[in-house]
Amino acid sequence: MKVHSATQPMDNICHYSPWWLKTRHGVKQVEIEDFKPHGQNMVVHIKGIDDRDAARELCQIDIAVERDQIPDLEAGDYYWYQLQDLKVISIYAGQETILGRVSHILETGANDVLVVKGDADSIDQSERLVPYVPDQYVKSVDLNSQTITVDWDPDF
């Protein structure tokens, strides 16, 4: 099967075991028997999946691994899952404004981008794209208070 990996380096995904796959029939635990790089992706053989039809059932599915398997990061670095759903507060031109919550993160190549969607507590219901550039736009991330403070014009 072809797998798109967001790990760095990309083959790191194959070193986690087991994988948890959310299928239309429920969550399935699988183990990787073999893998190799293939262009921008990985080709993997899942233990016990030797049939094309069985493999097709696992297409277009996200891979999850146990959180205790992923390594701790240095201070100031975060996994994407840690940033999702955090409240984003802008302090711009001396004014504090709640912009919404991080819905997801886009990888653009130059820098990641926080996709912030307005909610019941925010200034409006707009979606904003805030570049994840520490010290320039992202001033702080506080996992305890579940907030990200940014320097971002609320009109953008």
Image (spheres, grey):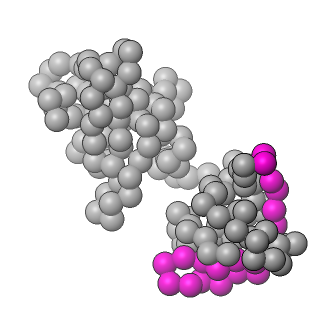
Residue depicted at 65% across the width and 64% down the height? 59
Point out residue 102 in the picture as x, y percentages from the top left corner: 41, 35
Residue depicted at 65% across the width and 84% down the height? 36
Point out residue 47 in the picture as x, y percentages from the top left corner: 84, 73
Query: Is any part of residue 15 visible from this angle?
Result: no
Point out residue 100 in the picture as x, y percentages from the top left corner: 35, 26
> Does 23 sit above or below residue 6?
above
What segment is highlighted magenta in the picture? 25-46
- How many marks can you see? 0
Residue depicted at 54% across the width and 44% down the height? 81
Is residue 78 found left or right of 56 in the rendered image? left
Residue depicted at 32% across the width and 19% down the height? 122
Q: Quadrant of the C terminus?
A: top left
Point out residue 139 in the picture as x, y percentages from the top left corner: 30, 37
Q: In which quarter of the image is the N terminus?
A: bottom right
Rendered image quadrant of residue 12: bottom right
